[in-house]
Amino acid sequence: MNTEELKAKARACGADLVGIAPVARFKDVLPERNPASIFPECRSVIVLARRICRGSLRGVEEGTNFGSTYQCFGYTWVEDNFLSQTSYDLSLWIEEQGFEAVPLFAYNEAGMPKGVPVALDKPAPNVYIDPRYAVTAAGLGEVGLGGFILTPEFGTRQRFSFILTDAELDGGPVTGKSLCGDCGGCATACPFGAIHLDRTQAVEVLGNVMPVAEIDTALCAVCPNGAFLAAGRGREPDRIAAACGRECLVRLEKAGKVGNRFENTFRKRAPWQLDAFKRPMTRDESGALKAIDVGCDKFAGTGVVSVHATGQVFSK
């Protein structure tokens, strides 16, 4: 089994992207995030991705459909069904070639449950590989200022998984940052001010330094603008369909930085936004966001006597 055979098989199993990071690229990663903690004989980390079809974002972009499109076809089913099947099938094939294969979800560690170390020299279970580091180390993409993993093929639109193997495979070139222009559009689009461009921390992968803004994930967790948090995935919400993530995609496509091209632009109307009370928001002449005052006039003749700030309607 060589690298090209492995990549061809991964694509035959449904992977849209496949990259390889030799385990040596993780030598400076802490044990709590290191693949060698899970599989000490690991020689290669295979990074797989399946795309999120752009159409699964349509209902969120229009503000008219969330759960039956994006939450399934863009989020949970992509990870739990489609991508996991790809990972499983490829793992079986690797083991048929005589090498061990350890399939893993690319979950973020934040908020995931931790157990008790089984020995003094071992990290506490469960060890999670940092997806931002692994994707960059495999040469598939980069980490943008808004914290999104970006690839030149799909921008923000993909889900990742890993396979650890004791097979020696060739690693892909690491390019560092080339897609994100640090425009700050993600922060501008966030109605909660959860993305702090003035406070950044560096994500460094093999000498490539990528600044990432501090993000208040507690605010993201209550964001009604397309952020999702599925069960069993810690406390960091998925923001690909949120106002910030959709703005990032719009700007990447407009700049011609996404290889998956379309006849028509993704954004066709001004984006909607809700505040923490789920009230519609609009921008004033200065560009500042403000909530639209929902009065009782719109309910005249309907029997409604008041509207709570949360949007709850009270009738006679």
Image (spheres, grey):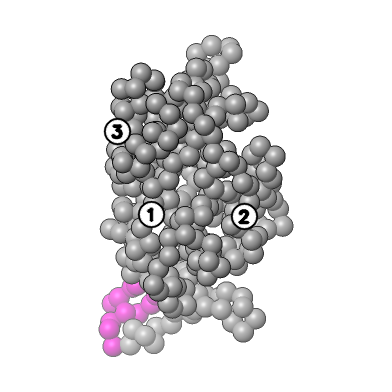
Closer to the N terminus: mark 1 or mark 3?
Answer: 1
Looking at the rendering, in which quadrant would you find the C terminus?
bottom left
Kindly state the secondary structure of the residue where label 1 is placed. Answer: loop
Tell me where residue 60 appears, x and y as whole percent: 38, 65
The three-letter amino acid code for the residue at tag 1 is: Ile
Q: Which mark is residue 52?
A: 1
Residue beneath the point at 31% across and 47% down = 77
Against 139, residue 163 (above or below) is: above
Q: Which residue matches tag 3?
A: 89
List the single residue furthest toward the top: 119
Q: Is residue 239 left or right of residue 203?
A: left
Tell me where residue 175 appears, x and y as whole percent: 61, 46
- Residues at marks 1 and 2, CA–CA distance in whole angstroms: 21 Å
The three-letter amino acid code for the residue at tag 3 is: Asp
Residue beneath the point at 69% across and 45% down = 209
Tell me where residue 68 appears, x and y as whole percent: 28, 58
Q: Is residue 88 left or right of residue 33?
A: left
Residue 306 is inside the magenta segment: yes
**Badge 3 local density, few (<14 within 10 Å), some, or many (20+)?**
some
Magenta span: 301-316
